[in-house]
Image (cartoon, rainbow, N blue to C red):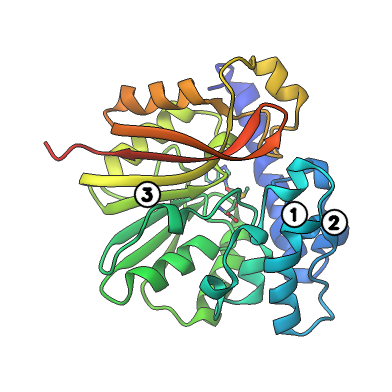
Amino acid sequence: MTENTNESTGLREQVRARYAQAATAVKTGTRNADLLVEDQCCGSSCCGGAPADRDETERAEASCCESSCCGDTATERSFGAGLYDLADAEGLPIEAIEASLGCGNPTAVAELREGERVLDLGSGGGIDVLLSAKRVGPTGFAYGVDMTDEMLELAEANKAKAELANVEFLKGTIEDVPLPDGAVDVVISNCVINLSVDKPAVLAEMFRVLTPGGRIGVSDVVAEDHLTGEQRAERGSYVGCIAGALSRSEYLDGLTAVGFTDTSVEFTHEAADGMHAAIVRATKPTA
Ligand SMILES: C[S@@+](CC[C@H](N)C(=O)[O-])C[C@H]1O[C@@H](n2cnc3c(N)ncnc32)[C@H](O)[C@@H]1O
């Protein structure tokens, strides 16, 4: 959490501007040229994976298959469309796949079931919301919340192309989610909580919007406990999903403080020295 309000507002504006630029680059087919590897939660753009002049199939294959194998650094290999199974992404708009800026595959982590209501915090171009909608089927529903207008426009366009009726994208912040208490069965998120300037508020909102017995399945960047805030910042930028990461203990303590049980943080792959993409799980008690 950042104590200083001006500093928090400035950081949030930097985040918004960064991801507005990312959304615009996907829409205009200039993502590779526009984004700098060291300044983003990156992905296929790291390696020139999906230029706009390829056809849809070539671009989907490039986004899903090349990105995970072409980066020279841990950071380049740790984010984006390469973390998804191509079979799962089949039928999704190429722009949703190209816009993927996450560090995991939370729809798989959350083991979504038919009929469930799902909320994705920081839904970006919508890939995890659309995948969730497919998994929960017509009797379930998938919401996405994002604060960046350009990302919401991209997500709405992707929803229209995917022709999924059980999807809604909401404008808002993940610190003040525009849904009532107990509205969903599952909260997912993909590489967004590290970007929040008020992480305790995000964890409290996840708890509030979940129905009793509900669960979270989150992918995020998490630091090893021995790294100070300064050392995390030396390893990467705030908008690039590194400097703002919680440590494993900070995550577990924060989840417990707002009421979650069965909490766990599992490191999956290194994103920077001592910093890992991780799967975060927890449950809201039934009573
Ligand atoms: C790294 S991108 C990840 C997008 C998406 N989850 C994915 O996997 O592709 C971060 C997204 O979170 C959004 N975001 C960041 N901080 C936010 C906040 N405090 N409230 C709402 N959205 C936020 C940004 O606008 C951006 O779309």
- Residue type at mark 3: give it: Val
Looking at the image, which residue is at 65% across and 30% down? 275
Q: Residue 90: percent from the left, percent from the top?
A: 56, 78
Nearer to the camera, 91 or 148? 91
Q: What's the mark number on residue 187?
A: 3
- Residue type at mark 1: give it: Gln
**Crowdedness near tag 1: few (<14), some (14–19) or many (≥20) residues, C-alpha within 10 Å:** some
Alpha carbon separation for disc pair 2 and 3: 31 Å
| Nearest to N terminus: mark 1 or mark 2 | 1
Looking at the image, which residue is at 59% across and 23% down? 224
- Looking at the image, is mark 1 or mark 2 nearer the viewer? 2
Q: Quadrant of the C terminus?
A: top left
- Looking at the image, is mark 3 or mark 1 nearer the viewer? 3
Alpha carbon separation for disc pair 3 and 1: 26 Å
**Crowdedness near tag 2: few (<14), some (14–19) or many (≥20) residues, C-alpha within 10 Å:** some
Q: Is residue 210 visible?
A: no
Check disc 1 and report its element: helix, strand or loop. helix
- Whether residue 161 sits left or right of residue 63 in the image: it is left
Q: Quickly name the residue at label 2.
A: 34
| Residue behind label 3 places its C-beta within 8 angstroms of ligand 1 | no
Q: Residue 250: percent from the left, percent from the top?
A: 47, 21
Check disc 2 and report its element: helix, strand or loop. helix
